[in-house]
Amino acid sequence: MMKEMRKIIIGANWKMNKTPQEGVELVSELKEQLGALGDMEVVICPPYPALLPVGAELSGTDMVLGAQNLYWEKEGAYTGEVSPGMLKACGCEYVIIGHSERRHVFGETDDEVAKKVRAALDEGLKPILCVGELLEEREAGKTEAVVKRQLEAALAEVSAEEVSEIVIAYEPVWAIGTGKASTADDAQRVAHFIRQLLAKGYGNEKAEAVRIQYGGSVKPDNVRAFLEQPDVDGALVGGASLKAAVFAELVKNSREG
């Protein structure tokens, strides 16, 4: 499968921003500015309280709803957690799993990420699986070792039939929210490494079907350079997704090429 066969996917990770009303207003503005998306996917990932109203506002558009996290159990005494089934009932199609902030701020382990991936797939949710290295790991030449460890752990219980349901987001931790984006060449190098790992585990055909995003200080003026790379199929966007005009410009720049 050639890159042209993989649909561009842009994810908007609002993180801990936007009340439900603010989220609805943002999506309303996006609808006016974007119109039909054509052959690309845009996933809006608000915080939990905004999922239902934002999902309702997305109805009838080409944009789809995603969540920022989940817990792997179906129900039970897990105060403060949200199950895959709850996200599905809110209309989510995607869920971000293993974001660096979950790993490094909240201490999420590779094993926990794997459980979340498995639970999401079991509920019919598509994981956006985040992998990426810290600055000190990059400077020590450990980027590939870290990405390999995170990816192999997360996919340990994922079958060849399921792997194409997963989106991989390469997010170098040192580039997230810092304004320091990776170069397009660096992003391509790691994305190609990820695809090679997938090919070893699942075969070339399955690996070619998986979409790989870049995330980390993606902006309207640099997104095209990333998407022009042969193994980069989209972007996971943080700060630039919080203003309708900026995100709309980013999406438009993503589909021009």
Image (spheres, rainbow, N blue to C red):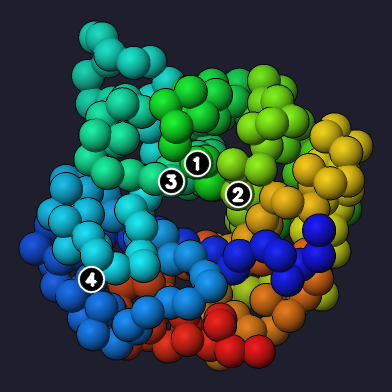
Q: Distance between the residues labelled 4 and 3?
A: 17 Å
Residues at circles 2 and 4 in contact by the CB criterion of under 8 Å: no
Task: Tell me the residue that label 2 is attached to.
Answer: 167
**Residue 74 drawn at (x, y percent):** 34, 16
Tag 2: Cα neighbours inside 10 Å, few (<14), some, or many (≥20)? Answer: many
Q: In which quarter of the image is residue 138?
A: bottom right
x 29%, y 87%: residue: 33
**Mark sitting earlier along the chain (4/1):** 4
In the visual, does 234 lie left or right of 146? left
Q: Eyeballing the image, is 254 above or below 200?
A: below
Q: Distance between the residues labelled 2 and 4?
A: 23 Å
SS at badge 1: strand
Q: Residue furthest left?
A: 21
Q: Eyeballing the image, is 5 above or below 162?
A: below
Q: Can residue 150 be seen in this view?
A: no
SS at badge 3: strand
Q: Distance between the residues labelled 2 and 1?
A: 8 Å
x 61%, y 21%: residue: 111
Residue 201 image label: none
**Mark sitting earlier along the chain (2/4):** 4
Task: Tell me the residue that label 4 is attached to.
Answer: 27
Q: Is residue 57 visible?
A: yes
Residues at circles 3 and 1 in contact by the CB criterion of under 8 Å: yes
